[in-house]
């Protein structure tokens, strides 16, 4: 039998079709981390998906109110149980995160992991309901809270600007949906239809359970099977690959707001998908351009031109490249011109060996350090798994080290402007 | 707990702490000076004269230190594959890096670029432009403005109310000479702290630091005397309101600590006690939180905190709300009631066990371990002392401290309103 490949050291086991368990023991950590992902396609149901974990967190059969749940977790040495939603290429994830102190660091007797799993199990499988619907009070409360969360995006101007660009740029792709949904959908959601949605969601979404840190893999498997395993009869499936778009004409958008500092975000499409050959070269390119403190844009726009405080370029799983610069409105044109000039210059191979090496070193260091951060380790392994690219740290490192300056120039050539956006 | 702390004090006066983390890939070091935004009036130890320093110098220095004789520190860190950064707070300026390789070189560089100075007229002018852009960014930030306005409302005289980075106007007055002088005064090893954490050998690291300091051979340490005006007990203003481009109104309700005269273990104990009181009254497990949340008075952003330093301190509650006035009134009602009734033993025990669990989490990363050690080192204690204080905390102590600090008359509100 072929050996099952590992995802950054995580061993995978299929518990049921579409339900996978990933474990990795590492006792340098004093806690056990558990993360459960439910995945679905990003789409018009985004608001319902976003609302779901927050409604579940309101109460369960045994702990019917949020205050009861919170108190129970405090008793368990401050066990952390948090929920979140995320966007991964064109998938939408709902995740439940658990972090508990390992039993051996707790004075007295008894396990903390098992009773915490019990809480989590109820939260996912036995939420508080009434006549086949979520409680109206809870629904109103969480709809209000989600509304406020979505509207608050504008309070932080840089992430707001980046989200606005995404909406404009991907206006005809599923990626346009914000992971927290849209306030317009909220009035149509009630306890009854949300409960029906919940039932469909938990029986049809692929599930990945990650356990990492101070754990005993066999015991975790037993606990997961005893407490968490939901219905395994239905097919759990999501769309395979994100849509691909080639930009036709450059669009420019200016949103006016009275601000001291403006925010410029330039959106580009790239030729690489996660796991493609050449993806490492593209990572080196985006890092060299704006991925660290000595990147081209940081050096030129901040250190040389004294034009910005913050500037960066970031690549996403959706094959987009976003360049952000916090710049005063009067300097916007100049900043934009410099950014494009510098991109062109890298494309033509106009960069030093040191500049290239700095980017490689930065990526290598960041890759090595994933081992020390449980959340990053789980997150990275999950991406590998979903993209169907199991890999070890060693292999990724080898591919990275094989990237040449010519590869970077080739990667730079695949970058095409799509939409430029300015807030201010 | 299997964590062993190594400590040492060098002849130049620098205390250093190292906590080995076998099995970790990352190493982290933080070197900080006791010099922050509140140090604006001092005695110059050379002339003996009292002098004023314009706001924003500590922060300007933080930017400027990265300029070295042979290049920029960030650039050399990038070559080493390490990440470097810095921040300026009320009473400290801290420089830190994370490395996965070549720790020795990265540490040498940290000592070099922080303890030595190299300012040119051009580099100072260039940095001025960058800082101006940074300050403009803060002017639009609701979080930043909220805090700034709260300290201005709480304090009449103490420089904690000054904007930590200074203003676009005040940084215009900062010259190369002034920066040099402040570096001499405040960046003496005797005024600093070094904390290191990672899979490292303490003897080797301490030897390296010792050798560097020997070569640096700083003059004998003469502590700089700071002056802080006598702060009245009352607050400057009951409320400051500002309009910004935000989605919802935001309340920040601060409580001025009029007994912030502690150091060492006593200070640590107080921090634990206030944290517990805030959790008991306003955390998710508290009835008040449920009541506010269920009626839509607060959302997920509601939180609380306590900043206590030597000589000043404040506790605060903050969050988005449709009605800042109503939320303020309700918070004060909860406090008034708790001042009379105190806390139940059951709740106290539960919250204490949570905090004990959380303190174990600090050891999960080199950064959080080191930052925790660092915060303790600044007040002259170790994390063992802190854990000791956490074990020893009593319900009576929490109640006493709570009644001392949370007085409605010592509170002030900072409110951010949407522009539209």
Image: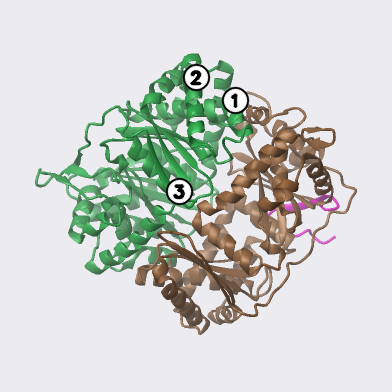
Q: What is the number of the mark on residue B142? A: 3
Counting from the top left corner in percent of width and height, residue A8 is at 66, 57
To the question of a shared chain for discs 3 and 2, the answer is: yes
Q: What is the number of the mark on residue B338? A: 2
Name the secondary structure under disc 3. helix
Residue B404, image quadrant: top left
To the question of a shared chain for discs 3 and 1, the answer is: yes
Residue at 81% from the left image edge and 40% from the top image edge? A192
The colour applied to the residues of chain A in this rendering is brown
Disc 1 crowd rating (10 Å Cα; few below 14, some 14-19, many 20+) is some
Of residues B307 and A27, the one nearer the viewer is B307
Instruction: Tell me, yes or no, whether the highlighted magenta stretch contains residue A12.
Output: yes
- Do we see residue B333 in this rendering? yes
Q: Which residues are magenta?
A: A1-19
* Residue B110 appears left or right of A319: left
C-alpha separation, residue under disc 3 versus residue under disc 2 = 30 Å
| Among numbered discs 3 and 1, the one appearing first in the sequence | 3
């Amino acid at each position: 039998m072929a050996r099952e490949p590992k995802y950054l050291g995580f061993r995978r086991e299929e518990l049921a079709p579409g339900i996978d368990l990933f474990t990795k023991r590492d006792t340098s950590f004093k806690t056990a981390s558990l993360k459960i992902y439910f995945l679905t396609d990003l789409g018009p149901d985004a608001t319902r998906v976003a609302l779901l974990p927050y409604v579940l967190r309101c109460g369960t059969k045994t702990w019917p109110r949020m205050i009861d749940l919170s108190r129970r977790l405090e008793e368990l040495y401050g066990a952390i149980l948090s929920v979140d939603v995320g966007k991964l290429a064109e998938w939408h994830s709902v995740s439940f995160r658990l972090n508990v102190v390992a039993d051996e660091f707790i004075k007295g007797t008894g396990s903390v992991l098992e009773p915490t799993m019990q809480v989590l199990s109820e939260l996912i499988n036995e939420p508080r309901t009434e006549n086949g619907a979520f409680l109206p009070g809870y629904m109103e409360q969480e709809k209000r809270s989600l509304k406020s969360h979505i509207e608050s995006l504008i309070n932080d101007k840089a992430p707001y600007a980046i989200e606005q660009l995404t909406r404009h740029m991907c206006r005809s792709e599923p990626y346009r949906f914000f992971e927290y949904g849209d306030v317009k959908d909220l009035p149509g959601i009630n306890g009854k239809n949300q409960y029906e949605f919940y039932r469909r969601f938990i029986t049809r979404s692929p599930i990945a359970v990650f356990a990492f840190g101070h754990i005993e893999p066999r015991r975790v498997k037993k606990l997961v099977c005893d407490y968490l395993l939901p219905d395994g009869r239905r097919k759990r499936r999501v769309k395979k690959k994100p849509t691909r778009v080639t930009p036709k004409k450059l669009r420019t958008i200016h949103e006016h707001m009275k601000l001291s500092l403006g925010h410029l975000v330039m959106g580009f499409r790239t030729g690489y998908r996660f796991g493609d050959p050449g993806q490492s070269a593209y990572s080196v390119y985006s890092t060299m351009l704006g991925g660290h403190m000595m990147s081209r844009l940081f050096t030129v726009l901040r250190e040389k031109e004294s034009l910005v405080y913050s500037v960066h370029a970031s690549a996403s799983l959706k094959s987009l490249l976003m360049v952000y610069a916090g710049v005063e409105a009067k300097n916007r044109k100049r900043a934009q011109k410099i950014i494009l000039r510098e991109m062109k210059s890298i494309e033509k191979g106009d960069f030093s060996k040191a500049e290239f090496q700095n980017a490689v070193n930065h990526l290598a260091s960041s890759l090595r350090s994933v081992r020390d951060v449980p959340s990053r380790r789980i997150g990275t392994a999950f991406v590998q798994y979903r993209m169907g690219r199991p890999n070890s740290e060693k292999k990724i490192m080898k591919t990275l080290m094989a990237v040449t300056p010519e590869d970077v120039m080739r990667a730079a050539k695949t970058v095409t402007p799509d939409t430029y956006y300015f807030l201010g | 707990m299997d964590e062993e702390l190594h400590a040492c004090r060098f002849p130049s006066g620098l205390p250093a702490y190292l906590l080995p983390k076998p099995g970790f890939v990352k190493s982290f070091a933080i070197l900080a000076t006791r010099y922050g935004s509140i140090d604006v009036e001092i005695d110059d130890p050379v002339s003996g004269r009292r002098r004023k320093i314009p706001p924003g110098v500590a922060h300007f220095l933080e930017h400027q230190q990265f300029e070295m004789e042979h290049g920029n520190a960030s650039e050399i860190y990038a070559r080493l594959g390490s990440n470097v950064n810095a921040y300026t707070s009320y009473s400290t300026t801290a420089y830190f890096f994370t490395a996965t390789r070549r720790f020795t070189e990265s540490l040498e560089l940290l000592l070099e670029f922080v303890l030595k100075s190299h300012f040119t007229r051009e580099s100072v002018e260039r940095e001025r432009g960058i800082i101006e852009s940074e300050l403009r960014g803060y002017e639009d930030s609701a979080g930043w403005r909220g805090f700034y306005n709260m300290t201005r409302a709480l304090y009449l005289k103490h420089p904690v109310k000054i904007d930590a980075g200074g203003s676009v106007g005040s940084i215009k007055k900062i010259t190369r000479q002034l920066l040099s002088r402040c570096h001499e005064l405040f960046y003496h090893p005797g005024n600093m702290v070094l904390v290191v954490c990672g899979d490292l050998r303490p003897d080797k690291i301490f030897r390296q630091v010792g050798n560097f300091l020997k070569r640096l051979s700083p003059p004998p340490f003469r502590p700089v005397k700071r002056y802080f005006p006598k702060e009245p007990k009352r607050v400057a203003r009951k409320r400051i309101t500002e309009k910004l481009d935000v989605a919802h109104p935001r309340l920040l309700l601060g409580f001025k600590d009029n007994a912030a005269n502690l150091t060492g273990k006593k200070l640590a104990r107080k921090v634990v006690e206030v944290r517990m009181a805030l959790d008991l009254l306003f955390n998710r497990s508290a009835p008040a939180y449920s009541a506010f949340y269920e009626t839509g008075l607060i959302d997920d952003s509601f939180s609380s905190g306590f900043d206590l330093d030597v000589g000043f301190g404040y506790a605060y509650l903050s969050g988005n709300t449709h009605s800042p006035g109503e939320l303020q009134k309700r918070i004060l009602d909860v406090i008034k009631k708790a001042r009379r009734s105190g806390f139940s033993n059951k709740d106290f025990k539960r919250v204490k066990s949570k905090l004990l669990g959380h303190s174990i989490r600090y050891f999960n990363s080199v950064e959080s371990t080191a930052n925790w050690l660092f915060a303790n080192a600044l007040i002259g204690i170790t994390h063992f002392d802190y854990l000791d204080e956490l074990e020893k905390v009593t319900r009576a102590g929490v109640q006493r401290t709570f009644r001392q600090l949370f007085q409605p008359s010592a509170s002030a509100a900072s409110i951010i309103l949407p522009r539209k």
